[in-house]
Protein backbone atom coordinates (compact mmCIF):
# COMPACT_ATOMS: atom_id res chain seq x y z
CA UNK A 1 0.00 0.00 0.00
CA UNK A 2 1.99 2.98 -1.26
CA UNK A 3 -0.69 5.65 -1.79
CA UNK A 4 -0.44 7.78 1.37
CA UNK A 5 -3.97 9.17 1.05
CA UNK A 6 -5.39 5.66 0.78
CA UNK A 7 -3.27 4.44 3.69
CA UNK A 8 -4.50 7.35 5.85
CA UNK A 9 -8.09 6.36 4.97
CA UNK A 10 -7.40 2.74 5.99
CA UNK A 11 -5.82 3.84 9.28
CA UNK A 12 -8.77 6.15 9.96
CA UNK A 13 -11.25 3.33 9.30
CA UNK A 14 -9.38 0.92 11.57
CA UNK A 15 -9.13 3.44 14.43
CA UNK A 16 -12.75 4.49 14.07
CA UNK A 17 -13.97 0.88 14.10
CA UNK A 18 -11.88 -0.06 17.12
CA UNK A 19 -12.94 2.74 19.43
CA UNK A 20 -10.19 1.61 21.81
CA UNK A 21 -6.51 2.53 21.50
CA UNK A 22 -4.65 0.41 18.93
CA UNK A 23 -0.93 -0.33 19.12
CA UNK A 24 1.11 0.97 16.17
CA UNK A 25 2.66 -2.47 15.79
CA UNK A 26 -0.77 -4.07 15.45
CA UNK A 27 -1.90 -1.53 12.84
CA UNK A 28 1.30 -2.06 10.81
CA UNK A 29 0.87 -5.84 10.89
CA UNK A 30 -2.81 -5.68 9.90
CA UNK A 31 -2.29 -3.23 7.03
CA UNK A 32 1.07 -4.61 5.88
CA UNK A 33 2.92 -1.31 6.20
CA UNK A 34 6.10 -0.11 7.87
CA UNK A 35 6.22 2.06 10.99
CA UNK A 36 7.49 4.93 8.83
CA UNK A 37 4.53 4.63 6.46
CA UNK A 38 2.15 4.54 9.40
CA UNK A 39 3.76 7.65 10.88
CA UNK A 40 3.27 9.51 7.59
CA UNK A 41 -0.39 8.45 7.44
CA UNK A 42 -0.88 9.54 11.06
CA UNK A 43 0.66 12.95 10.29
CA UNK A 44 -1.76 13.32 7.38
CA UNK A 45 -4.72 12.48 9.63
CA UNK A 46 -3.50 14.90 12.30
CA UNK A 47 -3.39 17.65 9.70
CA UNK A 48 -6.94 16.78 8.62
CA UNK A 49 -8.24 16.81 12.22
CA UNK A 50 -6.38 20.03 13.09
CA UNK A 51 -8.86 21.97 10.95
CA UNK A 52 -11.41 23.95 12.95
CA UNK A 53 -14.29 22.26 11.17
CA UNK A 54 -13.28 18.84 12.54
CA UNK A 55 -14.74 17.56 15.80
CA UNK A 56 -12.29 14.63 15.96
CA UNK A 57 -8.69 14.40 17.10
CA UNK A 58 -6.11 11.64 16.94
CA UNK A 59 -4.57 10.81 20.30
CA UNK A 60 -1.08 9.40 20.83
CA UNK A 61 -1.17 7.11 23.87
CA UNK A 62 2.33 5.76 24.32
CA UNK A 63 2.85 3.51 21.29
CA UNK A 64 -0.89 3.43 20.50
CA UNK A 65 -3.37 5.64 18.65
CA UNK A 66 -7.04 6.40 19.22
CA UNK A 67 -9.66 8.62 17.62
CA UNK A 68 -11.52 10.82 20.08
CA UNK A 69 -13.89 13.76 20.22
CA UNK A 70 -12.18 17.13 20.71
CA UNK A 71 -12.67 18.41 24.24
CA UNK A 72 -14.72 21.42 23.17
CA UNK A 73 -17.40 19.08 21.76
CA UNK A 74 -17.50 16.56 24.61
CA UNK A 75 -20.45 18.29 26.32
CA UNK A 76 -22.53 17.91 23.15
CA UNK A 77 -21.70 14.21 22.92
CA UNK A 78 -22.59 13.68 26.57
CA UNK A 79 -25.88 15.52 26.14
CA UNK A 80 -26.87 13.50 23.05
CA UNK A 81 -25.84 10.15 24.49
CA UNK A 82 -27.11 11.05 27.96
CA UNK A 83 -23.80 10.04 29.47
CA UNK A 84 -23.53 10.93 33.11
CA UNK A 85 -20.61 13.12 33.94
CA UNK A 86 -17.80 10.96 35.28
CA UNK A 87 -17.30 11.29 39.00
CA UNK A 88 -14.22 13.23 39.99
CA UNK A 89 -11.48 11.24 41.66
CA UNK A 90 -11.18 11.47 45.43
CA UNK A 91 -7.97 12.79 47.01
CA UNK A 92 -7.17 9.21 48.06
CA UNK A 93 -7.55 7.99 44.46
CA UNK A 94 -5.31 10.81 43.20
CA UNK A 95 -2.68 9.87 45.81
CA UNK A 96 -2.72 6.22 44.74
CA UNK A 97 -2.56 7.14 41.04
CA UNK A 98 0.38 9.45 41.70
CA UNK A 99 2.26 6.76 43.61
CA UNK A 100 1.57 4.21 40.87
CA UNK A 101 2.44 6.55 37.98
CA UNK A 102 5.83 7.53 39.40
CA UNK A 103 6.85 4.15 40.84
CA UNK A 104 5.19 1.51 38.63
CA UNK A 105 4.85 -1.37 38.76
CA UNK A 106 3.63 -1.19 42.37
CA UNK A 107 1.94 -3.57 44.78
CA UNK A 108 -0.91 -2.73 47.14
CA UNK A 109 1.54 -3.20 50.02
CA UNK A 110 3.90 -0.59 48.54
CA UNK A 111 1.05 1.90 48.07
CA UNK A 112 -0.12 1.30 51.63
CA UNK A 113 3.43 1.73 52.95
CA UNK A 114 3.77 5.11 51.20
CA UNK A 115 0.30 6.35 52.19
CA UNK A 116 0.31 4.84 55.67
CA UNK A 117 -3.29 3.55 55.34
CA UNK A 118 -5.10 0.58 53.82
CA UNK A 119 -5.45 1.26 50.10
CA UNK A 120 -6.94 -1.99 48.76
CA UNK A 121 -10.38 -0.57 48.03
CA UNK A 122 -8.92 2.51 46.30
CA UNK A 123 -6.65 0.37 44.10
CA UNK A 124 -9.59 -1.92 43.23
CA UNK A 125 -11.73 1.11 42.36
CA UNK A 126 -9.02 2.49 40.04
CA UNK A 127 -8.77 -0.91 38.33
CA UNK A 128 -12.57 -0.84 37.77
CA UNK A 129 -12.24 2.66 36.27
CA UNK A 130 -9.49 1.33 33.95
CA UNK A 131 -6.93 3.79 35.31
CA UNK A 132 -4.80 0.98 36.80
CA UNK A 133 -4.37 -2.61 35.60
CA UNK A 134 -2.63 -5.75 36.80
CA UNK A 135 0.73 -6.28 35.14
CA UNK A 136 1.67 -9.70 36.54
CA UNK A 137 3.08 -10.93 39.81
CA UNK A 138 6.38 -9.98 41.41
CA UNK A 139 8.95 -12.60 42.29
CA UNK A 140 8.62 -11.89 46.01
CA UNK A 141 7.22 -13.91 48.93
CA UNK A 142 3.49 -14.34 48.40
CA UNK A 143 3.87 -13.45 44.69
CA UNK A 144 2.02 -10.10 45.08
CA UNK A 145 0.12 -8.62 42.13
CA UNK A 146 1.79 -5.60 40.56
CA UNK A 147 -0.19 -2.68 39.10
CA UNK A 148 0.59 -0.05 36.49
CA UNK A 149 -1.26 2.83 34.85
CA UNK A 150 -3.26 2.22 31.66
CA UNK A 151 -3.67 3.95 28.32
CA UNK A 152 -6.97 5.25 29.70
CA UNK A 153 -4.93 6.96 32.44
CA UNK A 154 -2.86 8.72 29.75
CA UNK A 155 -6.02 9.78 27.89
CA UNK A 156 -7.77 10.98 31.05
CA UNK A 157 -4.81 13.19 32.00
CA UNK A 158 -4.01 14.37 28.47
CA UNK A 159 -0.62 12.65 28.24
CA UNK A 160 1.00 10.90 25.28
CA UNK A 161 3.38 8.93 27.48
CA UNK A 162 4.56 8.70 31.07
CA UNK A 163 7.61 10.76 30.06
CA UNK A 164 5.29 13.79 30.06
CA UNK A 165 4.54 13.46 33.79
CA UNK A 166 5.68 16.60 35.58
CA UNK A 167 8.82 16.30 37.68
CA UNK A 168 8.19 15.71 41.36
CA UNK A 169 8.96 18.75 43.50
CA UNK A 170 11.88 18.55 45.90
CA UNK A 171 10.65 17.96 49.42
CA UNK A 172 11.44 20.84 51.75
CA UNK A 173 10.57 18.90 54.92
CA UNK A 174 13.38 16.38 54.57
CA UNK A 175 16.09 17.25 57.06
CA UNK A 176 19.68 16.12 56.60
CA UNK A 177 21.85 14.86 59.42
CA UNK A 178 23.63 18.22 59.50
CA UNK A 179 20.28 20.00 59.94
CA UNK A 180 19.43 17.91 62.99
CA UNK A 181 22.91 17.82 64.55
CA UNK A 182 23.37 20.10 67.59
CA UNK A 183 24.76 23.53 66.84
CA UNK A 184 28.37 23.29 68.08
CA UNK A 185 28.89 27.06 68.47
CA UNK A 186 25.64 27.45 70.41
CA UNK A 187 26.68 24.58 72.72
CA UNK A 188 30.07 26.20 73.34
CA UNK A 189 28.39 29.54 74.16
CA UNK A 190 26.01 27.79 76.61
CA UNK A 191 28.93 25.99 78.26
CA UNK A 192 30.88 29.28 78.65
CA UNK A 193 27.82 30.96 80.15
CA UNK A 194 27.35 28.12 82.65
CA UNK A 195 31.05 28.31 83.62
CA UNK A 196 30.65 32.02 84.47
Image: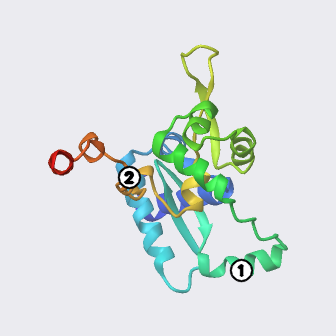
Farthest residue to the bottom: give it.
53
- Quick one: 2 or 167, which is closer to the camera? 167
Q: Position of residue 112 (x, y in %)?
A: 62, 37
Q: Which residue is mark 2?
A: 37
Crowd band around label 1 with a 10 angstrom C-alpha radius: few (<14), some (14–19), many (20+) = few
Mark 2 or 1: the one toward you = 1
Q: Position of residue 161 (x, y in %)?
A: 45, 52
Dot placed on the residue nearer the N-terminal end, 2 or 1: 2
User: Does residue 134 appear to the left or right of 163 in the view shown?
Assistant: right
Residue at the image position 39 percent from the left and 46 percent from the top: 35
Residue at the image position 68 percent from the left and 60 percent from the top: 89
Is any atom of residue 21 visible in this view?
no
- Quick one: 64 or 169, which is closer to the camera? 169
Crowd band around label 2 with a 10 angstrom C-alpha radius: few (<14), some (14–19), many (20+) = some
Is any atom of residue 165 visible in this view?
yes
Q: Position of residue 134 (x, y in %)?
A: 64, 34
Q: Quadrant of residue 68?
A: bottom right
Q: Which mark identifies residue 75?
A: 1
Amino acid sequence: MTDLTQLAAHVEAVLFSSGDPLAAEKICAALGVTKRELNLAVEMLEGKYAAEDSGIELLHLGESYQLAVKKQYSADVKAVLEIKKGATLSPAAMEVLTIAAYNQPVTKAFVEHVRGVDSSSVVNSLVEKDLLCETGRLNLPGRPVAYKTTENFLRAFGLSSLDELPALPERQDQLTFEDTAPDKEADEENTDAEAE
